[in-house]
Amino acid sequence: MTRSATYVTSLPGATFLGSIVRAIADIAKALQHRREIVHLAEFDDRMLKDIGLIRSDVEGALAESLLHNPSRVLVRCAERHTRSERMAAPVRSARPVVPLVKSVAA
């Protein structure tokens, strides 16, 4: 006797079991991202700036609870830095690259 996927997912408690499995997977992913962010903490300030972060961003991400994914904090920080840099960038007046030459009537 074979069971179809519909039968297995319609069992009472299957949604509860599915949510438990998802929660465990999310925690495992958060721990993996935390290990990767620990490697980011070893970068110097110039390297962090190249990827749009500062040291306090990395420290703040590592200060998050173990149950939260710290990479989301870094994404928000990088977006915030990018937005503030765009707003602070001076607007340069447009100048023609080639000077305009007026023809002289002969």
Image (tube, grey):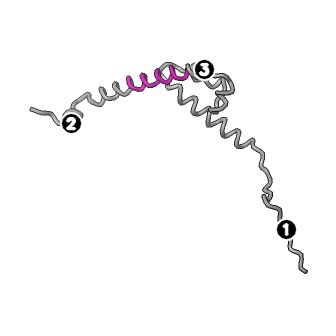
Q: Residue under label 3, please give it.
A: 41
Q: Position of residue 63 (x, y in %)?
A: 58, 19
Pointer 1 local density, CA inside 10 Å: few below 14, some 14–19, many at least 20: few
Q: Is residue 96 left or right of residue 49?
A: right
- Residue 26 belongs to the span the image colors magenta: yes
In the image, the segment drawn in magenta is: 24-37
- Per the model, the C-alpha gap separating discs 2 and 1 is 76 Å
Q: Secondary structure at mark 3?
A: loop
Residue density around tag 2, few if under 14, some if 14–19, many if 20 or more, within 10 Å? few
Tell which residue pokes out farthest to the left in this image: 1
The local secondary structure at tag 1 comes to: loop
Could you tell which of marks 2 and 1 lies nearer the N-terminus?
A: 2
Task: Find out whether the residues at labels 3 and 2 contact each other: C-beta distance under 8 Å.
Answer: no
Q: Are dots 2 and 1 in contact, CB under 8 Å? A: no
Q: At 21% from the left edge and 36% from the top edge, which residue is drawn?
A: 5
Residue annotated with mark 1: 101
Going by the numbered disc 1, the residue's amino acid type is Val
Q: Nearer the viewer, residue 44 or 55?
A: 44
Q: Which mark is residue 5?
A: 2
Question: Overall secondary structure of the magenta stretch?
Answer: helix
Q: Position of residue 100 (x, y in %)?
A: 83, 65
